[in-house]
Each structure stands twice: as structure tokens, then as C-alpha cells.
Amino acid sequence: MVDERRVRRMLQRVSEDITYLASRSEEGIPEQLADAERMAALKYVFVTTIEGCLDIAQHVCASEGWGPPSSNAEALRLLGRHEVLPTGLSEVMASAVGFRNVLVHGYVDVDDRLVVSFLERVTDLDAFVRHLSSWLIAQTP
């Protein structure tokens, strides 16, 4: 059974991160790229936001007996297969795992313009929170 309080707490934290990212999307790209400290903060918040979504997905998959997923991306795809998320959104979120991996593991030198461009995808993160919140409400007896 899903620990509703835990998931709500995680959703709240992800929502706070999304608010930060959304506020950054309103700033000019040149100003963001010119500020190394701002870029470092942006990268960190992207990591914590996506990690929060992964933690929620892994918890739901484990609690519902849908796993174990073979990867973090698969945990998000499972949410789509079980209609917690729309399939398209689950694929978008699964692709966000790759972005997170680049940021965390430094597989490539991260181009700051790529990071700033991901601000356009904050709405996908927000959609994740909305769908998980709705699903959680539907699960409550």
C-alpha cells in the first residue's frame, strides 16, 4: 500500500523545486548563462526535482507490486502502463532521467544552454505532480 503521507511530502518538495525552476524560466537566457552560481543552482534543482519524481515512482511501483523496475526510466514507464500517468508523459519523464544522469554523472560536458533549454519542460514536471496527486486522491478510500 502506498504511504500517502510520504508521497504527499515528496510531491510537495518536487512542487517547491518546480516553482523555483518556473521562476528561472522567466529570466533572460544570456543573464542566466553569464552567472555561474545561478547555473550551478539550476543544475542542482533539476537534479533534486527529477530525483524526487523518481523516488515517488519507485515507491508507487514497489507499493503497488509493479516492480521491481529494471531502471529508473522503467519505473516512470510503469506509471504510464498502469495509468497513473498518461503514456506520453511517462515517456517524457523517462527521458528526463537521461538529463538527470548527464547532470549527476557528468557523462558529457554539460552545455549550459541545454540546461536552460530544459526550463521549457518544467510544465512536464508540473504535470507529473498533478497526475500523481490525482491518482493518490483516487486511491484514498
Image (spheres, helix red, strand yellow):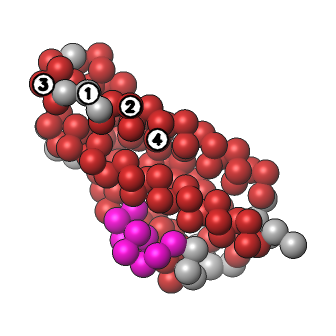
Query: Regarding mark 4 in the picture, which secondary structure is present there?
Result: helix
Marks 3 and 1 sit apart, C-alpha to C-alpha, by 9 Å
Mark number displayed over residue 23: 2
Residue 3 x %, y %: 78, 59
User: Is disc 2 in contact with disc 3, using a CB cutoff of under 8 Å?
Assistant: no
Residue extent of the magenta highlight: 85-94
The one nearer the camera, 87 or 68, is 87
Q: Is residue 84 above or below residue 42?
A: below
Residue 90 is one of the magenta-drawn residues: yes
Q: Which mark is residue 42?
A: none
Asked if one can make out residue 106 in the rendered structure from this viewpoint, the answer is no
Q: Secondary structure under badge 1?
A: loop
Amino acid under label 4? Answer: Ile
Q: Quadrant of residue 42?
A: top left
Q: Establish if 3 lies above or below 135.
A: above
**Of the residues tagged 4 and 2, which is closer to the observer?**
2
Do labels 1 and 2 touch, CB within 8 Å? yes
Q: Nearer the viewer, mark 1 or mark 4?
A: 1
Q: Is residue 71 left or right of residue 24?
A: right
Distance, label 4 to label 2, CA atoms, is: 8 Å
Query: Main structural element of the magenta stretch: helix, strand or loop?
Result: helix
Image coords of residue 111 (percent x, y): 14, 37
| Residue wearing tag 3 | 30
Q: CA distance from mark 1 to mark 4?
A: 15 Å
Which residue matches tag 1? 27
Element on which disc 2 rests: helix
